[in-house]
Each structure stands twice: as C-alpha cells, then as structure tokens.
Image (cartoon, rainbow, N blue to C red):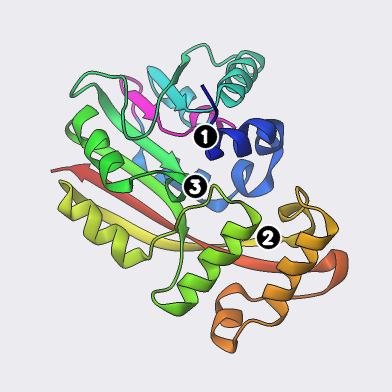
Amino acid sequence: MSKTLVQEQFGKNAAGYLTSTPHALGKSLERLVALTAPQKDWRALDVATGGGHVAYSFAPHVERMWATDITQEMLDLVKAEAAKRGLSNIRTAYAKAEALPFEDLSFDLVTCRIAPHHFDSIPHFLDEVRRVLKPSGVFAVVDNVVPAGSVGDYVNAFERFRDPSHLRAWTMEEWCAALKAHGFAVGHEEQLFKQMEFKSWAARHDANMQAFLRSMLAQATPEVKATLEPKGEGHELTFRLSEGLFIARRA
C-alpha cells in the first residue's frame, strides 16, 4: 500500500518533530495542561500525536494515555521516547483521526495539537472525538489558524508550498462554529502567536524553493505582512504564525 502525502512528509521528518521548538516547547503545550486540569483516574487520548509532546505532558497526570498517529515512524519514536522518560502508562496505536479504533464513551479527555490542518476531514474528526468521549468529557484542540478572506488564503498557500500535506488552516470563527455544530460546548478559546525561524522552517527544501518562500514573505501585501510579521533577513529571518486553542466539553 502506498503511503499518503502526510505519511511521507511526517515519516521522513519524524526525528525532527521530537526536537522542533514549536512542537516541543510552544506556549500551547503548557496551556493545555493548565486549562484542562487532568485527573489521576482519567483515560486520555492524543490524536495525531506526532512527536508525542502532548502525550508526554499529560501522562504523569492521568491513569492511561493513548497516543495515535498514521505514521509508523512517529509511533516508533513515541514508544522509545516514552520508555526513556519512564512513562509506562503511554500506549500507542495506528489510527486515522477520522476513524479512531476505540469504543464509544471511552475517554475522559481527548487532545489534538497542531495537526487538524493536515486532516482529510475535520468535521469527521470532530464526530469521532465526540463518539469516544464520555458524557461531559473534555476536548482540547490546538491548531494553526488564519484570518478570514484573502489574507488567510495567502498564509495557507505559503504553508502549503513548504509542506504539501498542509491542507487548510481554519479561522477562529470556523473552529467555534464547527465545535458547536458537532456537539461540543466551548468553554475557553484563545489565540496564541509563535515566532518561526525561517531557516529551520524551510530547511527541508533546496535553495530554489527557499528563495521562493522568502519572496512570498518579501512581496506580500501590507495586510499579509501584518499577519506574518516578517523580520530580519538571511539566516536571521523570522515570521509569526497563529494558533487557536479551544477547550470544550461533550454536550
């Protein structure tokens, strides 16, 4: 069976996600733990776990932590890293976000961080999350977000040129509406900003593609620049991306 574009992209870059600063140390990681107040008797699930950072953060606070992904290289990495950290309550499973291999009403908490913009169907993912959550269970989701309209379209295109497995980041408003439409009561929402180092962000590409991505930052409209905030040049070039964080309960 051939690998999907997501599996190709994340499989060959698996080790990098373990040490990636936005994934390993981003503000939203500690905010998730603080806002959800996990309990020792909870069963928790992290969907599209990637390098496993959410699973490592929650594992000490819950009874059982499941981590799922569609990339075997990621799952192998998480197993090894959990063992290194002495997190014996972490379990891994291969699973698409839209088809979770768990029974109804199985979890007290479901998390997903910086992944839905890669999913084939966020609505189907939300239905699966609601299905596996216990009544009044907590859903904590973080993903890249963009402004509405042409600025958001430009940011999505910029991201997609760098990573073709990036399908589309939603707006904050789209997330709120979708959560409500799929049976969740949103209790908290916030927008966070993260500064990206262009050099490491674009490192997977050759010089030609890096030059093209630099030109997208340099030649962007004032409205796009107000969102991406490019600063510096050469190896010092940075820009910013936005994340939306939502804490909701199964209604």
Question: Of residues 139 and 94, which is closer to you in this image?
Answer: 94
Question: Of residues 85 and 175, which is closer to you in this image?
Answer: 175
Q: Where does the image place residue 100, in percent across and percent down from the top left?
A: 32, 26
| Alpha carbon separation for disc pair 2 and 1 | 26 Å
Identified at 18% across, 24% down, the residue is: 105
Local secondary structure at mark 3 = loop
| Alpha carbon separation for disc pair 3 and 1 | 18 Å
Cβ–Cβ below 8 Å for labels 3 and 2? no
First of labels 2, 1 by sequence position: 1
Residue, disc 3: 114
First of labels 3, 2 by sequence position: 3
Q: Residues within 10 Å of mark 1 (few under 14, many from 20)?
A: few
Magenta includes 43? yes
Question: Of residues 24 and 58, which is closer to you in this image?
Answer: 24
Magenta residues (range): 39-56
Residue 133 visible to the viewer: no
Identified at 57% across, 82% down, the residue is: 226
The circle on residue 4 is 1
Q: Where does the image place residue 250, in percent across and percent down from the top left?
A: 18, 40
Q: Is residue 207 depicted above or below 123 in this figure?
A: below
Q: Amino acid at mark 2?
A: Met
Local secondary structure at mark 1 = loop
The circle on residue 196 is 2
Q: Amino acid at mark 1?
A: Thr
First of labels 3, 1 by sequence position: 1
| Alpha carbon separation for disc pair 3 and 2 | 14 Å
Q: Residues within 10 Å of mark 2 (few under 14, many from 20)?
A: some
Q: Residues within 10 Å of mark 3 (few under 14, many from 20)?
A: many
Q: Is residue 209 depicted above or below 43 in this figure?
A: below
Q: Is residue 63 depicted above or below 129 in this figure?
A: above
Residue 232 visible to the viewer: yes
